[in-house]
Structure formats: structure tokens, C-alpha cells
């Protein structure tokens, strides 16, 4: 006899057969599905942009797709949860969902275990959460960069997130996807006491109703690569270091990056087949990516203040490496596994006090361009840094006075004696 249990709180079902009354307890009281989340340490930045931490996830939230299936059936459509936002320090969401009670080993009546099929639920998550129209997957507000679309609620198959790279440093999205604890396989125990293994670094697939107070704990991993810049001066030496003389200031106007063959758009499949590795599909990487760091995006300690006296310039580039991009910002890149060349072009000024000049200082513009090769490309979850060493050599003089050489001799008698 097949047991059918709704998601409302039901203490027991009463069935009647052959004038006999028997009470069949559900496996446990119905319990809301609860979530937990963890994201690795990173620099916290307000809003949906910037690096994500466990703290920012509580504010920005993460999105959940859930599929209820019978037995080992294919996922079908997201019929249990669609882009449900989970947020706050208590990881709350709405509407609350309850575990299906129909599990194979929970059959306690006289029917054999094969009399009905097990209900399972598979869960997938991404972050930061974005609002989207469920029927189309289009992100609310017509966003054209960052997370631009989700799969809709009527298309069968894996949930996916469409991403487009932005050249705007204020619109970099740290796209995450959720997995089982990446460090080790986990054991999932059902309410009936049956246990099975969840694979480390993969989604939560085919879960049956667990024991009370069990949470689905997502460990979020970075699906993109990070690229940032640092600069240091090499004063009268080959490597970074040394000491600047006489109040000289080295300040940066802008840095331009050109990266041919970098993916511009791609689709992140949340059902990753390789543990701890993002599953990117439909990667489009034929164009050249052009990125410019200037103005307020340059670290204020390094930003050139224009044609002004050295005292009005910031401290400038020192002998130690400093971040060029301000406020912990960085570029996010769709991962690329092959060798990639980045052309770096930096414009900087050397400003020197000189009271004998009309302006009381000299100012020299330097424009330097060079290729940097990342032999292994850009792997997901990695921080990649371009370190620029600005070689500064003093203008030095030497002098010597040569001895006189003997010249020719001319003779004349004045007056002539006879």
C-alpha cells in the first residue's frame, strides 16, 4: 500500500482495511529543510560586487535550485526550489520547504520495501544571489555584465548561470558555486538510519530525508580567476628595492592591459562532474580583452596628482611592492587552462625638486610596455598578480682634466737684428 504524505505537519496517518484499524507512523515529524554555508576568507566589500566571504553571503545571499525525483530518475525541471534566496546569519529563506517523507527504508507497514519508490531531492547553489524572472531566467534589471542569466524553471536538466566579464573594476562579481565539503567525503544519514556517501567537492545529489536538525551545508568555491597588479621601484639596482634620493616622487597615471584570446562569456553548470572544479560550458574566448586602471581605481598612495610640485604628489612607488589597484579591487576572469600572454603598458612620472628651475621641479613622463606570460593560464580560485618593477637609475657624471699636449712652435725675431 503506497503511503502519500503532504508537506504539512502530520503526526500520523490512519488507514482502514478489512475492519482492522492500524496506525502507520511517518518516519519522523516533518522538518523544514535547513541550510548552512561557508566561503573562504577574502577581503570584504559592501554590495553584490567584490570578493565574497561567509559574512557577505549573509547579506547578498545565495541561490538554491532543488529537484525532487523518484528513485534515480533524471533531474527534470527544478520542481522543488527555483533560485530560492538563502541569507541572514541564520540562513533563512521563503517559502519554507519540508523533506518528502517517502523513503525506501522508512516503510514500516506490511508491504515490501519495493512497494513504492524513494523520493530524493538534489540541491545546487550559486552566489551571490540575483533576482531573475523564473519563466525566462532573465536577470531582473537587464544586467549585461557579471551574472546575466539563469536557466528558467521549465527547462529540464542541470541548473546553469551565464556570466559575462566586465572591464569595470566596480562591477567585478566573485561568482561562487556550492559543493559538499571539498576536503573529504561526507556521510548522509537518513531518518531511518540508512547512510550513504556524499562525494567531496560535488553537489548534494539524491538526498533522502535526514535525521532531525541535519543541515545542507554548502561550501562555496570560486568559479573565476582573479587578476591584480603590484608595483615597486628598483633604485639603482636590478631588483626591487633601494632608496630614493632628494625627494623624488614616482607616481602612476594609468596601467593598460591587453589580453588576447580571453573568454568573454561562459555558462557555469552547477552540476560539476569533476570534484572541486567548476564546470564551464559555451566558453567564448576569441576577442582581445582590454582593461584600463586609472583615476580613482589607482591606489591613492601611488596615483599621479598631475603637473604639480613634488610636495603635492603622494608618497609614490617605493622599493617594496604595493597594490596598484585601490580598495582591494581586482579583475575577475573566466578560467583558461592554456598559456596566456598579457601586454602591460604603464604610464608613470618621475618628479624631482629643483629650485634652480623656473617651475622649481622637473617632471618626466615614462611610457613602458612589456608582455607577461602566464604559462599555465588562469585557474579557477587562484589569485594572479602582475608585478611591475620600475627601474630608476640616477643620472651620474664623471669628469677629468686632460694634460696639455705640446703644439707646434712658430719663431719670429722682433726687431730683426743685422
Image: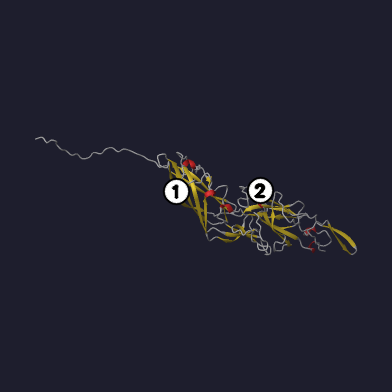
- Name the image quarter holding residue 84: bottom right
Would you say 121 lies left or right of 252 here?
right
Q: Secondary structure at mark 1?
A: strand
From the image, tell me which residue sits under label 2: 55
Residue 380: give x, y in percent of width and height: 59, 54
Question: 167 or 265: nearer the eye?
Answer: 167
Please tell me how crowded label 2 is: few (under 14), some (14-19), or many (20+) other residues with Cα within 10 Å.
some
Question: Residue reaching furthest right?
Answer: 19
Say if 244 sits above or below 288 in the image.
above
**Residue drawn at point x = 69 percent, y = 55 percent:** 85
Give the colour scheme of this rendering.
secondary structure
Residue at the spot of label 1: 366
Q: CA distance from mark 1 to mark 2?
A: 42 Å
Considering the numbered disc 2 on the image, is that residue within a helix, a strand or a loop? helix
* Depth check, front residue: 353 or 245: 353
Q: How many marks?
A: 2
Mark sitting earlier along the chain (1/2): 2
Counting from the top left corner in percent of width and height, residue 163 is at: 60, 58
Q: Nearer the viewer, residue 153 or 36?
A: 153
In this picture, residue 47 sits left or right of residue 319: right
Amino acid at each position: 500500500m503506497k503511503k502519500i504524505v503532504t508537506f504539512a505537519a502530520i503526526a500520523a496517518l490512519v488507514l482502514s482495511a478489512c475492519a482492522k484499524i492500524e496506525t502507520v507512523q511517518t518516519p519522523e515529524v516533518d522538518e523544514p529543510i535547513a541550510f548552512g554555508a561557508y566561503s573562504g576568507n577574502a577581503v570584504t566589500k559592501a554590495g553584490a560586487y567584490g570578493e565574497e566571504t561567509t559574512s557577505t553571503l549573509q547579506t547578498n545571499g545565495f541561490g538554491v535550485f532543488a529537484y525532487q525525483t523518484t528513485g534515480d530518475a533524471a533531474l527534470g525541471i527544478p520542481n522543488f526550489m527555483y533560485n530560492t534566496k538563502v541569507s541572514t546569519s541564520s540562513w533563512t529563506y521563503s517559502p519554507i520547504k519540508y523533506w518528502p517523507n517517502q523513503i525506501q527504508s522508512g516503510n514500516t507497514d506490511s508491504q515490501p520495501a519495493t512497494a513504492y519508490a524513494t523520493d530524493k531531492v538534489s540541491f545546487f547553489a550559486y552566489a551571490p544571489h540575483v533576482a531573475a524572472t523564473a519563466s525566462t531566467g532573465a536577470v531582473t534589471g537587464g544586467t549585461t555584465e557579471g551574472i546575466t542569466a539563469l536557466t528558467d524553471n521549465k527547462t529540464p536538466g542541470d541548473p546553469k548561470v551565464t556570466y559575462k566579464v566586465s572591464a569595470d573594476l566596480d562591477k567585478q562579481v566573485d561568482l561562487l558555486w556550492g559543493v559538499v565539503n571539498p576536503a573529504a567525503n561526507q556521510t548522509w544519514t537518513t531518518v531511518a538510519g540508512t547512510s550513504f556517501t556524499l562525494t567531496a567537492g560535488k553537489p548534494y545529489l539524491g538526498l533522502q530525508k535526514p535525521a532531525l536538525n541535519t543541515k545542507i551545508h554548502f561550501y562555496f568555491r570560486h568559479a573565476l580567476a582573479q587578476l591584480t597588479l603590484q608595483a615597486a621601484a628598483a633604485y639603482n639596482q636590478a631588483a626591487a628595492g633601494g632608496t630614493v634620493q632628494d625627494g623624488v616622487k614616482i607616481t602612476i597615471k594609468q596601467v593598460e592591459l591587453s589580453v588576447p584570446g580571453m573568454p568573454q562569456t561562459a555558462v557555469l553548470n552547477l552540476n560539476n562532474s569533476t570534484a572541486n572544479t567548476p564546470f564551464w560550458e559555451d566558453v567564448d574566448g576569441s576577442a582581445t580583452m582590454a582593461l584600463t586602471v586609472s583615476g580613482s581605481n589607482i591606489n591613492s598612495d601611488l596615483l599621479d596628482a598631475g603637473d604639480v610640485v613634488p610636495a603635492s604628489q603622494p608618497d609614490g612607488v617605493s622599493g617594496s611592492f604595493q597594490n596598484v589597484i585601490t580598495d582591494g579591487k581586482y579583475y575577475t576572469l573566466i578560467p583558461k587552462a592554456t598559456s596566456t600572454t598579457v601586454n602591460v603598458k604603464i604610464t608613470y612620472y618621475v618628479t624631482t625638486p629643483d629650485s634652480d628651475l623656473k617651475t622649481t621641479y622637473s617632471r618626466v613622463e615614462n611610457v613602458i610596455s612589456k608582455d607577461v606570460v602566464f604559462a599555465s593560464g588562469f585557474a579557477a580560485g587562484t589569485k594572479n598578480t602582475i608585478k611591475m618593477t620600475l627601474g630608476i637609475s640616477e643620472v651620474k657624471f664623471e669628469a677629468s682634466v686632460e694634460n696639455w699636449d705640446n703644439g707646434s712652435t712658430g719663431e719670429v725675431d722682433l726687431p730683426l737684428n743685422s
